[in-house]
Amino acid sequence: MTDAADTSDALGPLARRVRRSLNGDHPGQTGTMLPPLVDHHVHLQLTDPDAAVARGVAAVVDLGADPGAIATIARTEGLPHVRYAGAFLTAPGGYPAGRSWAPAGSVRELRLVGEGAGEGAGDAALEHRALAGPIEAAVDEQHRFGASVVKVALNASAGPVFDRPTLDAVLAAARSRGLPVAAHAEGAGMAALAIEAGVDVLVHASFTERLDDALVAAAVAGGQAWISTLAIHVRDDAAAAEIAIDNLRRFHAAGGRVLYGTDLGNGDLSPGVNPHEIAALVRAGLAPSAVIAALADPWPERTADWTDAGVATFVPDPAPAGAALAEPEAFAAWLATARIVPTEELEPR
């Protein structure tokens, strides 16, 4: 069996050996065809989406923006295709309210459900209904602006956070509209709060504390997905990177669903297929086929129809073969050469 065949097998069922058409650019060039790739955590008000497209990413999920602004960006023709959460939902004074980087209109501070409740059971029930209204209104606002997901901020390291009743109310409001809920969980106990409440996605692999195996197993059993965002820690904080990689390694080994995401817009990050993110995923125990699955996952939609624009991802030869595929830097360097090409330009070999 040839090295090319070995490599194709290792890349999994989403990969196909192809040759570029003699009628297009780079005629006859050989390589690997993958589905359109997705960065599941970006902030388009803080970055240039064209740079991501130029380096192999066809679709993105924006996880924190002014709802009107991101809806306008998403309607722009061409690539990248965009799905989005709209505004961050947070507790009064909670993260990221007041941050200089947070675009105007991108944060909604919601009163806690139990705040100021009366003493009697009847009063408490009435207060619950009165205070749940703003939660319904905030979720409905994101929905009306076309959001595909609702994002909550649970950052105990940077201010107040939702208590469990308030988080439950947000989850109920989102699910009544068919929207998953994604959480930024940072600080002691925040990942546990999100997992035990049944939040659908963690927008960062947990990086502030090591999660015990039982909690990781609960996340997997609940069908939770984790967006990787490992490169920001590799860049900024080696200790946080090791915690995140360890948590993600055990989550993936237990059968957890991993989504590729970079937090593009958070400082200096390579746009598109980020080799530092890919290498960290490999160090977290993801085989090449699992890395590709994380890049091609259709979340927050159920199918990949939203990423289909008559384009595919093309990664040119030479691809690493044999033992080199397991080397994080070698695999990452190759995958980072991915480019978007018209599907019709690629011919099966």
Image (tube, rainbow, N blue to C red):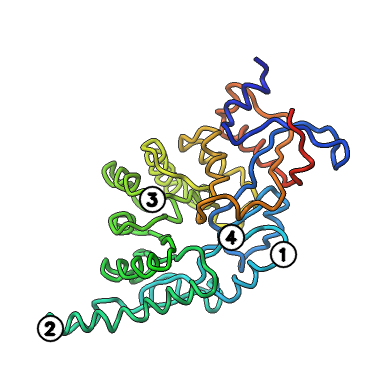
Q: Earlier in the sequence, mark 4 or mark 1?
A: 1
Q: Is residue 244 above or below residue 317?
A: below
Callout 3 crowding tier (Cα within 10 Å): few <14, some 14–19, many ≥20:
many
Q: Is residue 26 above or below residue 204?
A: above
Residue under circle 3? 224
Q: Amino acid at mark 2?
A: Glu
Determine the residue located farthest toward the left in the rendered image: 120
Callout 1 crowding tier (Cα within 10 Å): few <14, some 14–19, many ≥20:
few
Camera-side mark, 2 or 1: 1
Residue under the point 44% across and 44% down: 257
Quadrant of the snapshot with the N terminus: top right
Determine the residue located farthest toward the top in the rendered image: 1
Residue under circle 1? 77
Asked whether the viewer can see residue 266, the reply is no
Residue under circle 2? 119
Callout 4 crowding tier (Cα within 10 Å): few <14, some 14–19, many ≥20:
few
Residue under circle 4? 267
Determine the residue located farthest toward the right in the rendered image: 23
